[in-house]
Amino acid sequence: MIHTPLPKACFTRRRLLQQTVAVWAMTLPALPLAADSPAVQAAIDAIIGDRDAESGELSLTTPAIAENGNTVPIAVAAGGRFTADDYVEAIHILAPGNPVPEVVSFHFTPRSGYARAATRIRLAETQDVIAIAELSDGRVWRTANEVKVTIGGCGG
Amino acid sequence: MDKPRVKVPQKVKAGEPFEVKVLISHTMESGQRTDEATGQKIPRMIINSFTCKLDGEVVFSATLHPAVSANPYLAFYVVADKSGELEFVWVDDSGDTATATRTIEVT
């Protein structure tokens, strides 16, 4: 391997990382969100109202493939450590491909410490599972993950 | 609805969030299934709410819909400043409740 001296303004690993993060952050508000069916849109509107959802610091952890739709482990996390007046009030999980789109709502208080929760859910078919977080200052974060379901979980 | 199981750390640090895991036996009948013998829909019967209180004050709660799996499992975080009692309450569609309590020691 040949080592050539790098010019002073060249990419260091740190600079490259910073720039990558900066570019990533700029693209965040422009993330396209898939169109929702009327029933799902109604469920989302009931939570969000006329507020704008950004992707924010909300992460939804789901398996890429669920062999058994009857019990799919999911976990959500939003933001960091709570303070008395800056915290996440709720995270809602929606499954647009289920007979009832609402799945579960977690309600947090400053005494929860973190907006982190996990449970197991039923998914009728392959679909984008949606998570929506409501913050104490009125902001709304939204994210979604596709889960491929091998055997549906809503019974016959 | 029976056998509530709760997992909390025996000792926790003041002001430091700790994880709580709960599990309870319940069929969580979704209301979508049909009884093959009668052809009738099996009515919905699910745990629809869960609440965790610390010394009487709600610290976390959840609203459950039919898409939560049977024997619902929940994990979440709680902060305590002093030793106290955690109370867990599950309520199902028939109004039945199940309760569990755990004393936590704050060091």
Image (cartoon, helix red, strand yellow):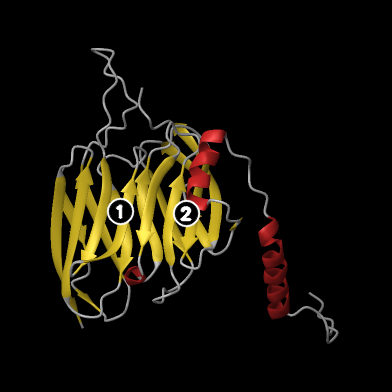
Mark 2: amino acid: Thr
Q: Is residue B92 above or below residue B32?
A: below
How far apart in space, not on screen, are marks 2 and 1 (Cα)?
15 Å
User: Which quadrant of the structure image shows residue A81?
Assistant: bottom left
Give the quadrant of the C terminus of chain B: bottom left
Q: Nearer the viewer, residue A149 or A104?
A: A104
Q: Is residue A134 above or below residue A22?
A: above
Give the quadrant of the N terminus of chain B: top left
User: Which residue ends up furthest to the top in the rendered image?
Assistant: B38
Q: Pinpoint residue A96: horizontal percent, then vertical percent.
A: 50, 38
Q: Pinpoint residue A44: horizontal percent, then vertical percent.
A: 51, 45
- Residue count near mark 1 (Cα–Cα under 10 Å), binned few <14, some 14–19, many ≥20: many
User: Which quadrant of the structure image shows residue B68?
Assistant: top left
- Asked which secondary structure carries label 1, the reply is strand
Q: Nearer the viewer, mark 2 or mark 1?
A: 1
The count of marks equals 2
Q: Nearer the viewer, residue B39 or A52?
A: A52
- Asked which secondary structure carries label 2, the reply is strand
User: Which quadrant of the structure image shows residue B102?
Assistant: bottom left
Q: Could you say which disc has been placed on residue A115 in the image?
A: none
Label 1: which residue?
B74
In this rendering, does residue A44 appear at all? yes
Q: Residue at 26% across / 26% down in the picture?
A: B43
Mark 1: amino acid: Leu
Q: Could you say which disc has been placed on residue A61 in the image?
A: 2
Q: Residue at 53% across / 51% down in the picture?
A: A49
Q: Nearer the viewer, residue B14 or B91?
A: B91
